[in-house]
Amino acid sequence: MQLNLFTSLTENRPKIDPGDLFEAYFLCRKNKRNTHNALVFEVDYENNLLKLAEEINNGTYQPGRSIAFIVNKPVKREIFAADFRDRVVHHWLIAKLNPLFERIFINDSYACRTGKGTHFGIYQANDFIKSCSENYKTDCYILKLDIAGFFMHINRNILFERLKQFIIKHYPSADKPLVLEICEKLVFNNPAQNCIIKGKRKDWHGLPHNKSLFHSSAGCGLPIGNFTSQVFANFYLNPFDHYIKTILNMRYYGRYVDDFVIVHQDKDFLKSLITKIRDYLKGELHLTLHPNKIYLQHYTKGVKFLGVVIKPNRIYIANRTKGNFYQAIQKQNKIARDHKPTKEEQAEFLSYMNSYLGIMMHYKTYRLRKRMIRKHLSGWWENYFYTKGYSKFVAKRKIAARPLDKSQLLQNAREYIEGERMLLN
């Protein structure tokens, strides 16, 4: 239930800076410009942004409907894609809060942070093991833990109360009431109650209830797929990070979302931490340690972390990533066998293949990349692309699609709106 803290604001309430909103829009459209949702907004983006600013200023802004769908790679997940105008608001809000969050976050939380990410987290975990084992000369052990259904069990009341106290104390600008108001509306918005289902209901078959917002307990859950959810999740677990680092005094600790590792020379000591960590998560954050994802082994056994396996003097790609790369190749082969690939399909080929090669390039995978491409990729694609050292595909000729003119934007917008009506009916 919303707290309605700001209904008493008068006409003297602060106003959003339109320049900030325009900047958030341009950041938002970088990766979403060609989606139908973005095209509808872009047809008249200046007026749409001014209208959005007016709604925020007069307090009538409410998050719109999200589109819910299932993705199966790298694992089965439920995604809620927010309306484009809401994504603009997300970028505006996070641009305001992120610099303040960065001051309190530990160095070793890696998700959704500039200069961090999966590769940084992998190399940090590798360095932890190497340092703790004194360059692989003494014993050390790796404890890897996971939080069960993390996003779906985030308590919105706890999250907002901590956000509110943090913003009141640390946010310096005059638009503080607006920032608090938007935080409240985004945190307490439950997109599962008013969403458009993309695909079929049976797509959810096999997805555990603790991984779906449709089955979350009252007052719990943040939608996977929202920019704000990723950043708020980091903020939610920040007290836990400091508990591990400061109270438990763990030097070798790193976390990516709800996946975290601790490295120490004493195996029994690490074992004793499990109960303390479980109690803290339950008592302070209403979260549950996953009972089937507790890994405690000697460093020579290696550890699977963020899509790779870390062993002494070697980091290699996990089997699931290799399997997903193989399936991506087969999907592209099917297109090439069926018909001459369109420009859009050629662009998709580059995006698919280079994303996998880009991940694999960070590790010693040359022979793997070479074997996968030479053995499994259809020779038909050689008519359009060549590889540079099996590290990147390059087009033999320009394949950029022709820019859409305004009439085409309008047509796409009409088609999108008609499609929305069909979904609703």
Image: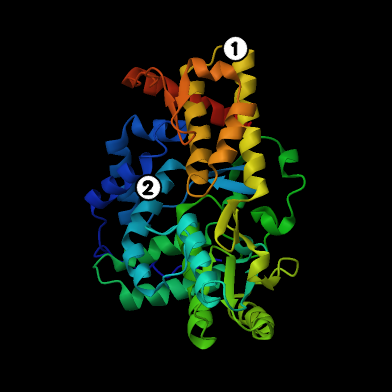
Residue at the farthest front position: 137
In the image shown, does 183 or 281 lie closer to the viewer?
Answer: 281
Residue occupied by mark 1: 339
Q: Is residue 260 above or below residue 365?
A: below
| Scheme of image coloration | rainbow
- Whole-percent x and y of residue 44? 31, 32
Closer to viewer: mark 2 or mark 1: 1
Q: Is residue 327 above or below residue 332?
A: below
Q: Is residue 284 visible in this depiction of the protein?
A: yes
Q: Is residue 96 above or below residue 378?
A: below
Residue under the image location 53 percent in, 16 percent down: 341
Give, as a three-letter code, the residue at label 2.
Val
Residue occupied by mark 2: 88
- Mark 2 and mark 1 lie on one chain; the one further toward the N terminus is 2
In the image shown, does 154 or 310 lie closer to the viewer?
Answer: 310
- Whole-percent x and y of residue 142? 63, 72
Give, as a three-letter code, the residue at label 1.
His
- Whole-percent x and y of residue 24? 32, 48
| The N terminus lies in quadrant | bottom right
| The C terminus lies in quadrant | top right
Q: Is residue 153 left or right of residue 166?
A: right
Residue under the image location 58 percent in, 18 percent down: 379
Residue under the image location 30 percent in, 55 percent down: 57
